Image: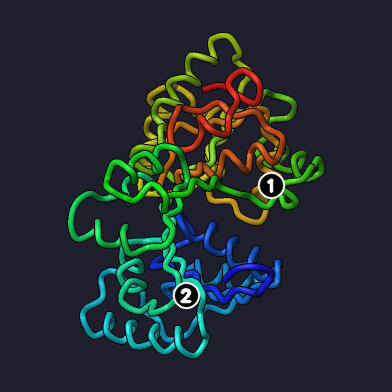
Amino acid sequence: MTGDRSLRVLNLVANRWWTGSADPALRLTLGLRARGHHALLGLAPGDKFEAKAREAGVEPVEGLHLDVRSGPAAVLADLRRLRRLVREEALDVIHVHHSHDHWLGWWTHGGSALVRSYHNERAVRRGWPTSSLYRSSQALVAISRGVEERLIAAGAPARAVHRVGGVVDTARFAADSRGAAKIREEFHVASAPLIGCVARFAAGRGHEALLEGFRLLRRERPDARLLLVGKGERRQALEAAVKELGLEDSALFAGYRDTDLPAVLHALDIFVLLGAGSDESCRAALEAMAAGRPVVGAPVGALPEVVVHGETGLL
């Protein structure tokens, strides 16, 4: 596993949705392949994560369930499949991303190195039996300084903890003036100051504070517009809040955007993120910065490490 030899790596992710660990794990798999390594991806099948992987040219490992809600039969089947995979693929590294796949990797890694990425502080747990996973893993990767400190406080060996920040595809978010113009035309904002937020409509994402702040801003800049990008269970509640605050004509819901997300970001003047979500690298803010947009954010997740207050944004 040293020198210039190509590594054989399995990224194992007990996740079926295109959120949290999904994009980082897929991007890591693609990055390893681009550097000449043999990289496999195991995921929970049947949803958008699988579709996104196939779209990127990565065929997920077949025969895995990786469902945290599955019963003993599915878990045993996964253990058998992973043991066979470790043997047949001669894996050097099993890189896991959640507690469920961490335990599966612990049981099956054999002589392979076991690596765990922690994408948020909530994933770090104290006490037995989790402490045995810390000691049995060759590396524990923290997405932020907060995660790093929490791991060490929970008893993880400091020598095994490594802080590695989030990444984005900078080429994807290169300048797109034509696409930006189309987005502004779609929402009839012309040359108005446009503030945007890309985040799931869920509790703890800070949308309520954003709306209240935008209401205050409108007193000085009545021409300003707010673009809320995303989907989620709190959309109706946020729509009601917009109406209650009298922002129906200025706070705009853009829905979930995927292929044209770079154009959406380039249409903005300012990007705001007040809650980290399940990926505390704050990837949405990193993507906005890759698009050249200043970020206004709360000191959550890795934001204090990537936003230089007063230079690249405000905290």
Name the N-terminal-most of marks 1 and 2.
Answer: 2
Give the side of residue 169 with respect to residue 240, left or right: right
- Furthest-left residue in view? 128
Q: Does residue 218 show up?
A: yes
| Image coordinates for residue 193, horizontal then vertical, percent | 67, 23
Give the side of residue 29 with respect to residue 114, left or right: right
Residue type for callout 2: Gly
Nearer to me, 70 or 93: 93
| Rendered residue at 27%/84% (across/down) | 76
Please name the residue that numbered disc 2 is placed on.
Answer: 42
- Furthest-top residue in view? 220
Helix, strand or loop status at disc 1: helix
Residue 45's tag is none
Residue density around tag 1, few if under 14, some if 14–19, many if 20 or more, within 10 Å:
many
How many labels were placed on the picture?
2
| Rendered residue at 35%/69% (across/down) | 101
Please name the residue that numbered disc 1 is placed on.
Answer: 262
| Rendered residue at 55%/26% (across/down) | 296
Give the side of residue 143 with respect to residue 131, left or right: right
The span from disc 1 to disc 2 (Cα, nearest Å) is 28 Å
Residue type for callout 1: Pro
Give the side of residue 153 with respect to residue 307, left or right: left
Q: Is residue 244 above or below residue 21?
A: above
| Rendered residue at 49%/69% (across/down) | 11
Nearer to me, 92 or 16: 92
| Image coordinates for residue 270, horizontal then vertical, percent | 63, 28
